[in-house]
Image: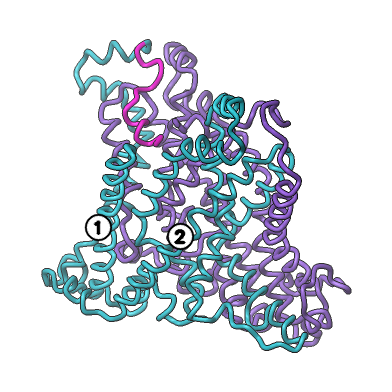
Amino acid sequence: MATYETTNPRTDASAMAAAAATKRRPSGGRPPWMEKPPLWMTALKSITLAFIVLIMLLPFVHVFAVSLSSYEDVLAGGLVLFPSNPTMAAYEAIFRGGIVVRALQVSVGLTLFGTLAQMIFTTTMAWGLSRPGVPGSKTMLFIVLGALLIAPGIIPMYLLIKELGLLDTYQALILPGLISSFNLVIVRQFFMNLPQDLIDSARIDGASEWHLFWHIALPLSKAVLAVVALFYAVGIWNSFFNAILYLHDPTKWPIQLVLRQYVLQGTDIANAADLPSNVPQPPARTLQMAIVVVATVPILIVYPFLQKYFTKGVLTGAIKG
Amino acid sequence: MDTASGVQTSPPGQASTPHVKTRKTSVWKRMWANRAVYLFILPGLLWYVVFHYLPILGNVIAFKDYSIFIGILDSPWVGLENFRDIVTDPAFEIALRNTLIIEGLQLIFAFPAPLALALLLNSLINERVKRGVQSVVYLPHFLSWVIVIAVWQQLFGGTGFLNQLLLNQGFDRVSIMNNPDTFKFLVVLQSVWKEAGWGTIIFLAALTKIDVQLYEAAAMDGAGGFRRLINITLPGIRSIVVLLLILRLGSMLTVGFEQYFLQRGAVGANAAEVLDTFVYFRGIVNGDWSFAAAVGLVRAIAGAFLIYVANWTAKRFFDEGIF
């Protein structure tokens, strides 16, 4: 989400939706007034659902299986779902060092530091804008929301980064997407819905603004902050546009650019990955699929958390139907 | 939705806060009393100014003959010359046409897909099945385009699974991933695969807001499942559909960058160039800065205009809009 593409209203609308998608029917089971559907209908529905689930899942199973395949399996081709002679050779090869390991380090580092920076800037500003009775607050909020409507454009952004001397630096991948107005509005709304009595009484007891923020607002908002942080982190991990725009030096590439170079463009990975020449190489196809898998796994790891939160509707407070 | 209402509503409990007293005092005193709050806002505000509004001003180079060696301020003004060049540029015409065709196809195929899927999911009685399907179909949304296209390449590419299978069975290869003629359908299919599941969320949320009693009453009156769908479900989600349609039309000139950029090499610029990639290659790769900025600016203004028109139309005909 930290990319140029975030300003696309489509993304925002769907993220907004994430929040709302939550209230379920009070209980499962068929309500008494609903007639039992005919058998053919049930069958048709089941087949459609099974088909949908399969076309979503099988490609990933296949990619994973190919990444574990031996040379013979790859030559045989076909829809490999279970490698007959599974081998970790491709993973051993790419983790032995070289460009993939470096790219993973870059991506992990960027994701950790980037998300931290994004959270600091987003939460502090959201807190400031959530405080009642501050002159100019509305104008400043307008500046935030205006950013959702007008995007600066590729060329001026590039020139700005260039003028700031940030080309070929990692800051160039973080700074342009430091705050997502959408996330900021969610956090602000959540802060505003916190029990104001609690904040006021702490205020009267002489608590500083920082104390209110750090010891009251943040601990009460853990769930919403977790969601926002996860969305930011996924955005940085996936970010491609900023990297292709601002990083010209291949040694600094994050994993998504390495993926493009060696998987989509088919550049021979064997040379770049510092693979030793005295041992037989795993086939290029399994190496490529192994890179796809290592780039996907972090998303799969956080996915259950993401899903748990957006289905629990922590963000519902931000949405007014 | 939330953004608009967020501005207007005052925070809850404001009336009972101690700030009511300070409201009567002068603005300066209130500002001084809240000086710590400004410190919280300041870093973010600076970021917005430098990384959002400053580059918007940078669009002035669209009216100049910008040279990277002279700088923005000293480059000579050329008036509307860059904008006149847009009209006669054949490559721009191709990019614009591709963008509009792809967006049209998306509107026909990719827009209704999540709605259909949401209706299907909503009709499921078994919560566990429903939740299971949901977690599967949401997943690709969180993957990058690079990964998605790598997976598609492995399945449908020249040496991918499908072609291997065809060759083994004695058939000819089919060209899917690098066929310029079908590329526009391919990208729509990819979009549906990646985003249809995620798109259901907003419809599902709207569907759960429909009063169950309406269904019950209709069923009592003898309306069958299909009648209830037509007369209750669809009207119940009409406003969200209109809203999404407005957003969609407003971003008609922004089909995205990565999906097209990544596949442009395989099918060629004639099939895959869209406005975003056009601006990138013209400006950043070829160094035609001012011309590319002019294209970007025209697109942004046209986009704002489209949102306005779509919203006006929706208000006129459906009595609902977002502004």
| Sequence-earlier tag: 2 or 1 | 2
Q: Residues within 10 Å of mark 1 (few under 14, many from 20)?
A: few
Q: Say whether residue B294 is left or right of residue A90.
A: left
Front residue of B83/A171: it is B83
Amino acid type assigned to the residue bearing label 2 in the image: Ile
Please state the extent of the stretch shown in magenta in the rendering: B1-15
Report the quarter where the N terminus of chain B lies: top left
Q: Nearer the viewer, mark 2 or mark 1?
A: 2
**Residue B247 appears anywhere in the view:** yes
Q: Which SS type dominates the magenta stretch?
A: helix
Q: Say whether residue A26 is left or right of residue B252.
A: right
Q: Is residue B24 above or below residue A277?
A: above
Amino acid type assigned to the residue bearing label 1 in the image: Ile
Q: Quadrant of residue B289?
A: bottom left
Label 2 sits on residue: B108
Image position, residue B28 (x, y; %): 20, 23
Image position, residue B65 (x, y; %): 17, 74
Q: Is residue A321 above or below residue B174?
A: above
**Residue A228 appears anywhere in the view:** no
Question: Residue at position x 36%, y 54% from top?
Answer: B249
Determine which of the numbered discs, if any, sits on residue B301 in the image. 1
Q: Are marks 2 and 1 on the same chain?
A: yes
Q: Residues within 10 Å of mark 2 (few under 14, many from 20)?
A: few
Chain of the residue under label 1: B
Front residue of B282/A88: it is B282
Question: Residue at position x 62%, y 32% from top?
Answer: A24
